[in-house]
Image (cartoon, grey):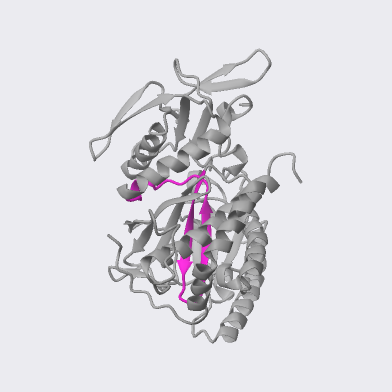
């Protein structure tokens, strides 16, 4: 069942979505050629914001944790995509080790792990779960609310004669290791020097190393090329952004840089709003340049707001997941969401395995405004049946029809995935 969207298209986005639908053949060829030059990440999810006049990604996650929120109809597509991904790395693989987050008490997250493991098993792999959690010292059986069970085991590292190491479990030697742990707490010794096995995603994709600013710099490159193909203004699918380094919220250093960047971005956004006749209040999202779970995020519409944070606001911005201290912040053009579900603000989240869209859901928040991050406690999810509509637009239908809306989502999400591929190439250790 397709959720009923209270969405009114207008102006430039209506024209953009028409162009995307009409150019679908050229777009698919463009992607096909791009994937010949760049290897997609094993998987990823993209948070999109649809403003009615702009459709753009605002975050790209390389360790997606919401597979349990995808509709059951999507599973055949997800299994096919996972098969294609595995064949690239271990064509004759039998064993795959899945390393989840240390959230052994978070049932929502664990149901994601169960769904992901199920997808992988149906590709013909034996999948077992190994934990980085030091509290897991023996095989631990966990019962989930839906009646499923997960067996999580302690990891075992074996040193090889050549100095390298292999990672596995008791009587289990995997060809590939899939991380569903974003390494916010740092890269543990257990994962270092694993040269004979394929680590997916690579270690430098984790938040101990990765930076959102690098991703959106790569996204700039991708969008410029794509916009040339469609003869569109790149801004329609690309949020402006800036970066401030050497920030310390507790010591109030870096405030001047943030204020200047907020001013600069607001000036650029307002100029675009004027160009397109958009009657909106411009705003900027300030967020940690590394980290996830919606932590370390705030919305501002004036530079003075980053200069006068109270103690509670500074504490909220200073530290993100796993106690990671914030020293760099991304300042990103705020994209309001025009979409609503059940009378609440909503935003689409698109899931991909390899280069394929495999589903998605709406993140919905009853108490957040259309100008705030919806990735916050109190959110809930409504699955989207992407199965055919994400890849098959219907040019006989208007842009707001579900197949066309979802196709446009899938196109913009894949642009972000391509940017992630380029980002990982550019930030690979040893690369400049």
Q: Nearer the viewer, residue 350 or 396?
A: 396
* Residue at figure coordinates x 53%, y 54% from the top left: 60
* Residue at figure coordinates x 41%, y 22% from the top left: 137
Give the image location of residue 309, x and y in percent: 53, 67
* Residue at figure coordinates x 37%, y 70% from the top left: 401
Give the image location of residue 190, x and y in percent: 56, 26
Number of numbered discs overlaid on the protein picture: 0
Residue 209 occupies which quadrant of the picture? top right
Does the stretch in magenta take in 220?
Answer: no
Residue 250 seen by the camera: no
Give the image location of residue 131, x and y in percent: 44, 29
Q: Is residue 386 above or below residue 133?
A: below
Q: Say which quadrant the N terminus sits in.
A: bottom left
Q: Is residue 186 above or below residue 4?
A: above
Residue 214 seen by the camera: yes
Farthest residue in the top direction?
161
Q: Is residue 294 left or right of residue 246?
A: left
Range of magenta residues? 43-71
Q: Nearer the viewer, residue 73 or 273?
A: 73
Q: Nearer the viewer, residue 50 or 12?
A: 12
Q: Is residue 106 left or right of residue 418?
A: left
Residue 121 occupies which quadrant of the picture? top left
Residue 231 occupies which quadrant of the picture? bottom right
Give the image location of residue 219, x and y in percent: 62, 59
Q: Nearer the viewer, residue 237 or 388?
A: 388
């Amino acid at each position: 069942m397709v959720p009923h969207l209270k969405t009114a298209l207008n102006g430039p986005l209506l024209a953009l979505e028409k162009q995307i639908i009409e150019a679908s053949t050229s777009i698919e060829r463009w992607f096909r050629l791009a994937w010949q030059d760049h290897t997609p990440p094993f998987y990823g999810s993209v948070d999109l914001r649809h403003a009615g006049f702009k459709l753009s990604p605002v975050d790209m996650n390389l360790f997606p944790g919401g597979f349990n929120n995808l509709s059951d109809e999507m599973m055949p597509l997800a299994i096919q995509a996972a098969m294609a991904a595995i064949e690239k790395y271990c064509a004759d693989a039998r064993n795959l080790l899945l390393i989840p987050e240390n959230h052994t008490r978070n049932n929502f997250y664990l149901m994601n792990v169960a769904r992901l493991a199920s997808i992988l098993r149906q590709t013909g792999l034996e999948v077992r779960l190994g934990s980085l959690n030091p509290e897991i010292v023996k095989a631990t059986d966990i019962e989930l609310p839906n009646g499923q069970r997960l067996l999580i085991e302690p990891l075992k590292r074996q040193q090889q004669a050549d100095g390298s190491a292999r990672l596995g479990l008791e009587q289990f030697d995997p060809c590939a290791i899939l991380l569903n742990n974003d390494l916010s707490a740092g890269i543990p010794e257990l994962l270092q020097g694993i040269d004979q096995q394929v680590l997916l995603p690579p270690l430098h994709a984790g938040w101990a190393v990765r930076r959102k600013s690098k991703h959106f710099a790569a996204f700039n490159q991708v969008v410029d090329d794509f916009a040339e193909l469609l003869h569109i203004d790149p801004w329609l699918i690309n949020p402006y952004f800036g970066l401030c380094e050497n920030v310390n919220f507790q010591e109030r250093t870096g405030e001047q840089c943030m204020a200047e960047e907020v001013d600069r971005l607001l000036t650029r956004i307002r100029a675009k709003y004027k160009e397109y006749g958009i009657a909106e209040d411009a705003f900027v999202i300030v967020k940690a340049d590394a980290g996830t779970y919606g932590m370390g995020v705030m919305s501002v519409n004036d530079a003075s707001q980053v200069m006068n944070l109270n103690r509670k606001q500074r504490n909220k911005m200073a530290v993100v997941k796993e106690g990671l201290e914030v020293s760099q912040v991304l300042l990103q053009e705020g994209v309001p969401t025009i979409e609503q579900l059940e009378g609440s603000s909503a935003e689409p989240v698109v899931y991909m395995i390899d280069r394929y869209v495999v589903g998605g859901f709406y993140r919905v928040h009853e108490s957040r405004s259309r100008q705030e991050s919806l990735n916050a406690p109190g959110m809930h999810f409504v699955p989207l049946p992407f199965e055919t509509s994400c890849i098959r637009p219907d040019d006989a239908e208007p842009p707001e029809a579900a197949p066309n809306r979802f196709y446009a989502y899938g196109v913009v999400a894949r642009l972000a995935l391509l940017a992630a591929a380029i980002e990982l190439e550019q930030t690979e250790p040893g690369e400049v």
